[in-house]
Amino acid sequence: MPAPARLFLDDLHIGQTFISGTHAIDEAQIKTFAVQFDPQPFHTDTEAAAETFFRGLAASGWHTAAITMRLNVEGGLPFAGGIIGAGGEINWPYPTRVGDILHVENEVVEITPSRSRPDRGIVTVVSRTLNQRADVVQTLKAKLVVLRRPMK
């Protein structure tokens, strides 16, 4: 499949959507990430996790966020110049579990060209990360710096 076209601020409109590819998550990924970055029993120990708030092994929210980022970089948000964060708000309404297959649905909700820097603007994107059952495991409302098309 050809790489998606890289889009500039001038190519975007409110309501525009982008859907990423998928990522399957397994027990080893959950535990490996957690041991290094979020070593809590509900992320690292299958038996101990059964007795916690999650009632079973769950991926760290930060792991879900990292997967979301990778899916967006690989084509979920095909912005010229990359995905450059300028702030945001994140929520994890459902846990990511062993066997989940995640994808991201992105929607452009606001576009603000910069007044002081005419080569860029801020685009607000709502990214919903869903599993194979369409449960939303993460919602991220992010402000992103997006470049304008260079003048010729």
Image: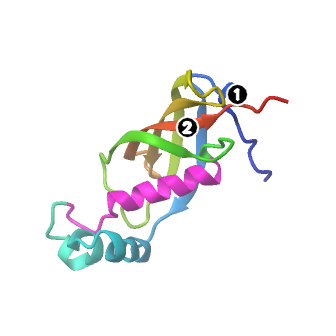
The percent coordinates of residue 10 (x first, y second) are 69, 25
Task: Give the dominant element type of the magenta stretch: helix, strand or loop.
Answer: helix
Residue situated furthest front in the rendering = 116
Tell me if 58 is positioned left or right of 113 in this view.
left
Residue position for label 1? 11
| Coloring basis for residues | rainbow
Mark 2: give few (<14), some (14-19) or many (20+) Cα within 10 Å.
many
Please state which of the two labelled residues, at mark 2 or mark 1, is closer to the viewer: 2
**What is the distance, in whole Å, between disc 2 and disc 1 at their CAs?**
14 Å
Q: Is residue 134 magenta?
A: no
Rendering quarter of residue 136: top left
Residue at position x 52%, y 38% in the image: 144
The percent coordinates of residue 60 (x first, y second) are 32, 62
Residue position for label 2? 145
The percent coordinates of residue 149 (x first, y second) are 74, 31
- Is mark 2 in CB contact (under 8 Å) with mark 1? no
Residue at position x 52%, y 50% in the image: 103
- Which SS class for mark 1? helix
